[in-house]
Structure formats: structure tokens, C-alpha cells
Amino acid sequence: MNLSLPVAELTALLLASVRAAAWLMISPPFNTNVIPAQIKALLSVAIALPVVPSIVGKVPALDTAAMVVSLAEQVVLGTALGFLTALLFAAVQAAGSLIDLFGGFSLAFAFDPMGATGNGGSGVFGRFYNLVAITLLFATDGHQLVLRGFTTSYNVLPLNGTLSLSNLQHLLTDGIVEMFAASLQIAGPLIAVLFCADIGLGLLSRVAPALNAFSLGFPVKILLTLTGVGLAMTMLPLAVENLVDKAVKAVMQAIGS
């Protein structure tokens, strides 16, 4: 009995899975270490399976050189689309890092720099904001919008399609600007409060040096930071929703849709 394998379908599945795997390694919320590598590999195959019938006619020539070039193109394309998404979502963690800096929570890294490296170089609120953003993505089904935006790339840029580098360059530049602007919008009000607290403590130390405003400043800033973060949590879901919309639009523009 002769066993015939659908070579074109298997090749399309392989190339589409490579693109999905490269995207899953970088794009939030799937880039977290909480998801094992085996699950990401299976998920990449699950993403590629539904699109195989539409891309099987775009399979490159079945020779070594063409396959190597196509595999490299899929890795670059998946990485680029994942980086665009991750760049915008980095605004949430950047906002938390700004709060750590102005609130004094990043001071621990000055005493334990190796501990900062082990924690990914992020402070308390940097990790907390990142965890809350990932939770909100899954709770509000935002990950499905991000995933749908990526799967659209198989229709617009099939296996023999190429990504416009000039368009990607402009999107990366705009994405960096959007990231810094969004992080300032999220953390800006609390930073202003902490800055005013620093000014007030500085004036207090000049007026009444005996109060030792330096030692008094630590519990005061901790209290203000925790209170401000608690109040700002109500605005974070809207910020994450806006970031999801911007990330999907950026991916659509990158693939020319």
C-alpha cells in the first residue's frame, strides 16, 4: 500500500506555523514566561491550521534554497508584527516604572542590582502594571482582537509576500512616540502628585530642619503612591483598550491592509 502525503499542505502548515511561533514569542499577552514553550508551539500550529487552505496555493518551490529563504521571511514577518504589538503594550510597564522611579520603589535596585537583573530590570509597579494589563487582555477578550489582526496577515501577505520595510520604519517610529505618550498619560497624574510632594518636603526641611523631612518622606511617598495607584486602577482598563486598538491598527498598516 502506497502512502501519499499532501506535501503542499504540510509545507504551508510548516511555514505558517513558523510565522505564528515567531509572533507568539514576542507579542503580548503570549510572550510571558507563564506560558510554556510547548504550549506556544502547539498554539502556533493551531493558529496556522485554519489558514492552510487559503495559502496552500502560495507555497514556494520545494527546493532547499527557496525553503530556507521562505522560512527566514516568515520569521522576520512574525517578529516584526509581534514587535509592533509589544512596543505599544510596553507603555503600561513603562508607566509602572515611572511610578517606581518617582515613588522611590526603584531605590532597592541601587542596593541590590543583581536582584534587579533577576527580576527583568523592572520595579514593583512595573511588574504589577504589566501583570494587570495581561489580565485585562484576557478578561476583556482583547487577546482575540490581537490574534485576529495577526491572522489577517496570512490573507494580505501570504507565504510569497514581502513586508514593506519603509512602511515598517515609519510604524516603528510612530510606535515609539505612542509608547512614551501613553506611558506619560497613564502615570502623569501620579507623577505630578509625587513631584509636588517632593517640593513640599523640601520646603518643610528648610522651614523646620528638626523634623528630619528626609526620613519622613519615605512613608509619605509610599502612602501617596499606593493611594494614587489605587485610584488610577479605574482608568487602566480604558488605557489597555486604547492600546489594543492602536496595536491592531499598526499591524493592519504594516501588512498593507
Image (cartoon, rainbow, N blue to C red):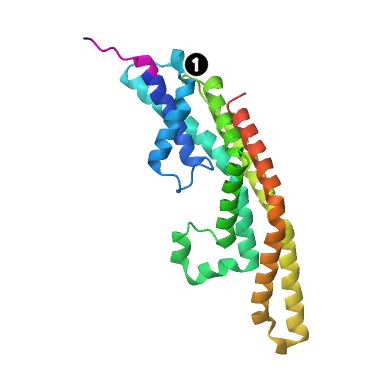
Dot 1 alpha-carbon crowd within 10 angstroms: few under 14, some 14 to 19, many 20 or more: few
* Image quadrant where one finds the C terminus: top right
Tag 1 residue: 54
Q: Is residue 168 above or below residue 241?
A: above
Most distant residue in the left direction: 1
What residue is drawn where x is 48% and y is 56%? Answer: 120
What residue is drawn where x is 26% and y is 12%? Answer: 3
- Residue 35 visible in this rendered orientation of the protein: yes
Q: Main secondary structure of the magenta part?
A: loop
Relative placement, left or right, of 55 versus 96 is left
Q: Nearer the viewer, residue 3 or 109?
A: 3
Q: Nearer the viewer, residue 31 or 160?
A: 31
What residue is drawn where x is 72% and y is 72%? Answer: 198
Q: Nearer the viewer, residue 124 or 68?
A: 124
Most distant residue in the bottom direction: 210
- The magenta region covers 2-9
SS at mark 1 in the image:
helix
The quarter of the picture where residue 202 lies is: bottom right
Relative placement, left or right, of 74 versus 144 is left
Q: Is residue 98 above or below residue 163?
A: below
The quarter of the picture where residue 243 lies is: top right
The image position of residue 186, as x and y in percent, is 69, 53
- Residue 73 visible in this rendered orientation of the protein: no
What residue is drawn where x is 74% and y is 71%? Answer: 197
The image position of residue 131, as x and y in percent, is 56, 52
Q: Is residue 176 above or below residue 70?
A: below
The image position of residue 175, as x and y in percent, is 63, 41
Most distant residue in the top direction: 1
Please count the marks in the image: 1
